[in-house]
Amino acid sequence: MARLVLDRLTKRFGAHAAVHDVALDVRDGELMCLLGPSGCGKTTTLRMIGGFVTPDAGDIQIDGVSVVAMPPERRPTAMVFQRYNLWPHMTVAQNVGFGLRLRRLAHAEVDRRITQALELVGLPQSGRKFPHQLSGGEQQRVAVARALVLQPKILLLDEPFSNLDARLRVRMREEVKQLQRTVGITTVFVTHDQEEALTIADRIAVMHQGVLQQVDTPATLYAYPRTLFVADFIGTMNLIGARAHAAPAGTVLSAGPWQLVAAGARWPEGSDVTVAVRPEDVVMAPGGVEVEVRRVVNLGHYLQAVLWCPEIGEVRMFADKGAALGEGQRIAVQPARALAFHGSELVEIGGPMRPAAASPAERR
Ligand code: ATP
């Protein structure tokens, strides 16, 4: 087990900062996902941890020791790449043991570790096979075994399942989570797939344009996104332009036809605010705003509806499978809960009030 600390890590390619001032603390045994859209800097961050890219500024510490000057093979890290790069002319056992032989370990020890690693990934009988005799999922498991056999302190996974089909990806993600729990190894997992991150991560670090936006558990990220980017990127969100007005009860926000009281806010009269409402928080309520049901998709366990409100445009709603929702129908709805963003400040509307300013680290 080991702790990994990234201290204000920066990498520029020309004038462009691919990674800017990233500070992250990955705890002992934790599975941390780096999540963000293509080009946000997550792979560059992972490659800096593994020693394949040299940072322009900042430090990387593993158990309090800086590894930033060490070449990859001297770092206590092991990386599993997107393309698993198994050597086709070597057997599975030879592939898994390759790194150990480079380290000149005794034959008996190499064999013992290979057997143990193949058992861990559920391929105890496959040592004599060649990679082409394995399925894509099995090849990826061999790649994971090849990393684990080195007994690294930190396991680095770079979109390891992106070459697999959707069903296998879901299965592999569960297997890796289980394996990571069994071994208890500190892991950094890069993905652009939020569902993957939400299912396997202990915590998720969301990146955007080289900048760390928020580091939190999946549940907290979903319920309390700290920036508009995270609010929009994680899950489905209705983002509605609103205007602030001072009122005795606090600030009232005019969000289309909705008047929402942001009791914790003290925002200047007339300032622009963005109100974020999850589709499951759009609820039918007498006295709510009347909208037209444009489309309804029955997903079996719940309904997804697109509502039309002339002043706002489309509003997405998730409803119970038993809800009486028909296309063309007019219904009255209102948000049961919303978040209001004003610059770097945000206030929760409905439920317990939690006014909060994003911390400087999260804003960076
Ligand atoms: P993806 O999911 O597409 O792999 P990513 O979030 O992992 O994206 P990076 O690969 O880290 O993003 O790239 C971050 C930015 O740095 C991108 O704009 C990319 O074009 C740029 N970049 C990455 N590697 C290099 C390089 N070797 N030379 C120049 N620019 C690079």
Image (spheres, rainbow, N blue to C red):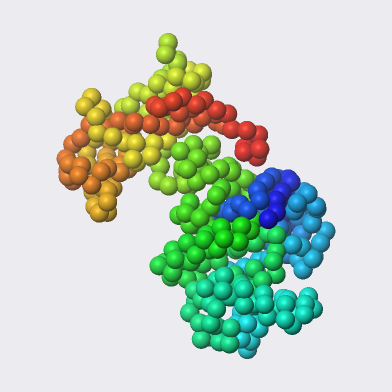
Coordinates of residue 23 in the picture (x, y in percent): 69, 45
Q: Nearer the viewer, residue 220 or 269?
A: 220
Quadrant of the drawing holding the C terminus = top right
Coordinates of residue 64 in the picture (x, y in percent): 78, 49
Within the image, what quadrant is residue 131 found in? bottom right
Is 80 positioned to the left or the right of 338 in the image?
right
User: Is residue 83 in sight in this rendering?
Assistant: no
Residue at 53% x, 52% y: name it. 201
Can you say whether 229 is above or below 284 in the image? below
Coordinates of residue 74 in the picture (x, y in percent): 79, 66
Can you say whether 283 is above or below 271 in the image? below
Is 308 positioned to the left or the right of 113 in the image?
left
Residue at 65% x, 61% y: name it. 155
Can you say whether 262 is above or below 144 in the image? above
User: Is residue 127 in sight in this rendering?
Assistant: yes
Residue at 66% x, 83% y: name it. 94
Q: Nearer the viewer, residue 300 or 179?
A: 179
Is 258 positioned to the left or the right of 72 in the image?
left
**Count of residue discs:** 0
Coordinates of residue 218 in the picture (x, y in percent): 50, 46
Quadrant of the drawing holding the N terminus = bottom right
Within the image, what quadrant is residue 188 found in? bottom right
Q: Nearer the viewer, residue 108 or 252?
A: 108
Residue at the far top: name it. 248
